[in-house]
Amino acid sequence: MSTPDGATGPTIDEPAPDPRSDGQLTSLSTQAARQLTTTTKSEPQMQAISSRWLLRMLPWVDVKGGAYRVNRRLQLRVGRGRVQFEHNGADDIKVIPETLTELPVLRGYADTEVLREVATRFRVREVRAGQVLVEAGQPVTEAYLVVHGRFTRFAEGKYGEEEILGVVTDGDQIGDEAISRPDPLWLSSVRAETAGVLLVLPWAVVQEFTERVPSLAAHLEAYAARQSLPMNRKGEADVPVQAGHVGEPTISGGFVDYELAPREYELSLTQTVLRVHTRVADLYNDPMNQTEQQLRLTIEEIRERQEWELVNNREFGLLHSADYGQRISTFAGPPTPDDLDELLSMRRKTKLFLAHPKAIAAFFRQCNRRGLVPGTASVEGHEIPAWRGVPIFPCNKIPISPQNTSSIIALRTGEGDQGTIGLYQTGIPEEYQPGLNVRFMGIDGNSIIRYLVTAYYSMAILVPDAVGILENAQIGRTAE
């Protein structure tokens, strides 16, 4: 802006130049001030820490001998398992012979050559959605192994309506009820709810093998004889009792027989070696002890793995140890209130559900569609969503399959209720927490202090119906 004499310069309405524009400060900067202060620090944080409700809700039993034996009454009814398949192409599907022993009628059969021959006689058959596979009352002419698909067992109700009896999915079998019966008939009808693939074995082939292979015939006869023995509704050897009699009849007598080879659970473990440099441990401990913080986060990681093992371990984990008779599949895909009701009905005194958070969200969506509002349960000061008064705890250790399905687990817990219990041992050397110890391993030539951190644990299912699983629960959103 020009002045009257033609010179240029600032006017009274222009801002004065910033004295700090040339780097000159008029007061102490915050960066410099921080040199004379201390910061308030948080403890090291860890994203992977979860609520670990399974570890918190399990009753833990102290196992002083390192193993826990589950004694049970003698079981006469043989439990069923699931067969596995080998896929070499769309039409080249074979049952793995060794897994045929998961079928009740072949449980314990040891002749692998016969099993391999039986496996070669199965034929692949594709079915379409809505196709009725068998009808109740018709003769059994084939046995089926489900490779893929969902099939519904149904029967005609008392008043002519259709009653759903159950759902059959991957790895299950259809037709084993005909074994040891002279003229077997289908007890229920079976319909394919989705397109699926089956392995089919003609019933004539079963009879042929029975006539040709003495060992197989003897095994099937022993199975039939065992199934004809008196047993209670749970398949245990029966004890004769009388009720409602009058006079002086002779009272039947008997005894309670036990399993001769009960299962024993040995304590498993999770371990790691924690390394801390002596210089760090000696000098950098204010305001927080470095060794304690390293140990705290290491133990958190061990506890996370411990819960994962209790769910997924192939020896004692819930998903692998649950009896196949206590597994059901969702009827329509997503987990519905009807599915959880059926899961509840399979046992007494269900204490809790465990589900992946996404499975819980999928269940709530089904409740919303029906206009239902699940209740809550107060647990340790937390309001937990509940169904029929049973709390539903989130557990991110339950896996989600590539097909976007998951499982929901129902548990009865405690020794007094013949439920599920956690196993550990207390009083171990250098114990840091119950069942977990930290042992000093010395200092190496590089001045590294080493600590061995170990957690000992396992899980036992006292009777089969203590655990139930709702499988194949679709957790993705579906079109409204």
Image (cartoon, rainbow, N blue to C red):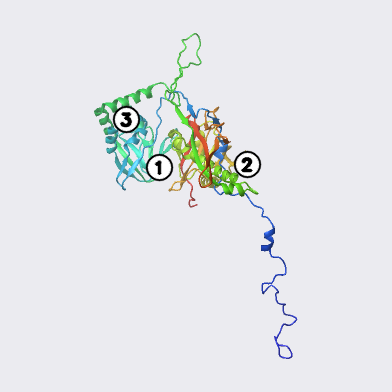
Judge left or right: residue 16 versus residue 450. right
- The image's mark for residue 209 is none
Residue 184 point in image, percent of width and height:
33, 29
Where 107 sits versus 148, above or below?
A: above
* Residue sticking out furthest to the right: 12
Task: Find disc 3 in the rendering and name its residue.
Answer: 110
Q: Nearer the viewer, mark 3 or mark 1?
A: 3
Count of numbered marks: 3
Residue 240 point in image, percent of width and height:
45, 17
Task: Indicate which disc, 3 or 1, sits on the residue closer to the N terminus.
Answer: 3
The answer to whether one can see residue 372 in this image is no
Task: Indicate which disc, 2 or 1, sits on the residue closer to the N terminus.
Answer: 1
Q: Secondary structure at mark 3?
A: loop
Task: Indicate which disc, 2 or 3, sits on the residue closer to the N terminus.
Answer: 3
Q: Secondary structure at mark 1?
A: loop
Task: Find disc 1 in the rendering and name its residue.
Answer: 150
Q: Secondary structure at mark 2?
A: strand
> Amino acid type of disc 2?
His
The answer to whether one can see residue 470 in this image is yes
Q: Residues within 10 Å of mark 1 (few under 14, many from 20)?
A: many
Judge left or right: residue 317 versus residue 297. left
> Amino acid type of disc 1?
Arg
Q: Nearer the viewer, mark 2 or mark 3?
A: 3
Judge left or right: residue 365 versus residue 288. left
